[in-house]
Amino acid sequence: MKKLIANTVKLQAYFNFTFVLSIIACITLLFDYGFQKSLDIEINLVVFYQVTLSFGVIAFVLRLLRMAHKPKIPVFLFDIISTLYTLIIIVNQLVHLIGVLDYNFLHHDTWLSIAVLLMFIREFSEIRIQYKRTLLNPAQLFILSFLFIILIGALLLKLPLATSQGISFLDAIFTSTSAVCVTGLIVVDTATAFTQFGQTIIMILIQVGGLGILTFASYFSFFFKGKSSYENQLTLSEITNAKRLSEVFTTFKRIIIITFGIELIGAILIYFNLNAKDFIHVGDQLFFAVFHSISAFCNAGFSILSDGIADPQFKFNYGFQIILIGLFILGGLGFPIFSNIFNYTRRFVIRNLFFWRKNQLDNKPWVLNLNSRIILITTFFLIFFGTLLFLELEFDNTLAEHESLYGKFVTALFGATTPRTAGFNTFDFGDIRFPTFMLIMFLMWVGASPGSTGGGIKTTTLAVATLNLLSIAKGKSKIEIYRREISMRTVQRAFAVISLSLIMIGFGITMVSIFNPDLSLKEIAFECFSAFSTVGLTVGITTKLSSLSKVVIILLMFVGRVSMLSILIAIFKRTKHKNYRYPMEEISIN
């Protein structure tokens, strides 16, 4: 028995050592890609990667030998495929080290980097992650995770090979915050200031910021282990708003599959809607497609074009623009809506096309729930009336250069949907008329839907506030829609979100106007609405902001992403529910 325990301890020590080695290898990768090195250092790094990967292969074999029960098929396939891939990489690198050395091959070997990252993911998934609710509540954990990624992102963007000529730490923090908070405001040109390595860092920050680092870390840990503690599930359920604890990791799985699936389809469609003559080689075209697909679906608004989509080579590419519109509309709907629509569509198809199987369906009267109905209706009205108004107001202004009615319509649709936190531009927003300017600010303020990658006060908040106004006007004491009553807690949260958003935007406008008195109120208001709603649109003043104004915009982007309500919940201690009520009184409002 003692021998068995001793062997187990030794194995665990080896696995811990392998995990630490994988972390060191990942840090070394950053050094490898971020700094200039001599050929001798390149060779030594490749040898170190080979040694690290060899330890990873041995760890896989040891796990396989000590398995007491049959492993899950997906996990087993991942281990087999990644291990075979790693072995091929090790042998391939040995051939190059023993044979003729190729400096370019060693420096640009992304396949080796992928093998190291796969090893890190596998070793990280074996670490037991425990969330202590007594130490950090879910809101605090959520906020700190974003702060951590922003800081790491800023440090990565400061690497010498991430930029063309280097940037200040404040600009790195600004860019990292804008990427993680999926905003899109920039103080340096993403196309020229950053190398492809730096642009890749920004793309990864957008992806992690859009989904959340906790989504990745928690799901991969659960994927390999197949279990999680009750405390972990309770914490994550509050972050994901899962109705049941059993749905937490199912929700994570759906989020990851939906995100990567749509982004992959989007990248393929973008790739085939581009003109190959606009790119030096296929790799650049592919990177362009992937970058813009991720940026669009995550509603980030980052582009590796200096003028954005308003670039002369792309502003008339309506097929490309329609794909972007589809991506950021889908990204702005929210992951719960995808799941609900999928279930509704599946039941509809079975009932109407495979009717002989309809007895297998349970009699569920409300498949498309109230939340989905409100979001879809509100989104439709915002897009429909926003497009019509934009078309009417800008027909002979910013839309005049588009000769065909189809081109004008696509540009108007783009202009009406991009303010709802997407942040891409197909024209100069400084040229729009004042009524259009006010329309854009309203759409930015509303933003996307809850549970999505977008910001703003959210479509449901606007819908609940509107329904509450109609209910009061009709003399009703409660809000009713589709034979359902909206809870008072929902109404309270909606008006709290509206109040806090206006307070924060007002604070931002006041501070920026103090720190940049040379800018007009119109320009500052547009910038602050854009930052808080994580939109990323600008009238061209972002690069003119002073250092203190940049700090204010950074704060607005961060608060807009994590929400001011979450920050207040993180700060204030929750009071225990007490079973009494004081006498109720009316207070004069108007």
Image (cartoon, rainbow, N blue to C red):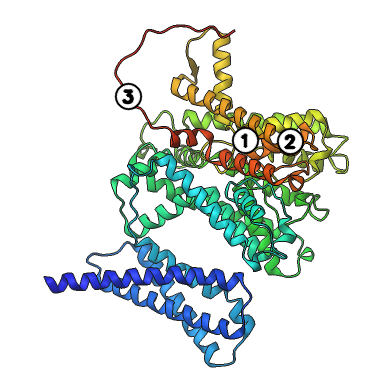
Quadrant position of the N terminus in the picture: bottom left
Q: Which of the marked residues, 3 or 2, is nearer the chain's N terminus?
A: 2
| Residue 59 visible in this rendered orientation of the protein | yes
Q: Look at label 1 and name its amino acid.
A: Gly
166 versus 460 height, above or below: below
Q: Quadrant of residue 557?
A: top right
Label 2 secondary element: helix
**Residue 440, percent across and down?**
72, 33
400 versus 487 height, above or below: below
Residue named by callout 1: 447
Which of labels 2 and 1 is toward the front? 2
**Residue 590, percent across and down?**
59, 7
571 versus 70 height, above or below: above
Gap between marks 3 and 1, in whole Å?
Answer: 33 Å
Q: Which mark is residue 524?
A: 2
Label 3 secondary element: loop
Q: Residue furthest bottom?
A: 99
Q: Which of the marked residues, 2 or 1, is nearer the chain's N terminus?
A: 1
Which of labels 3 and 1 is toward the front? 3
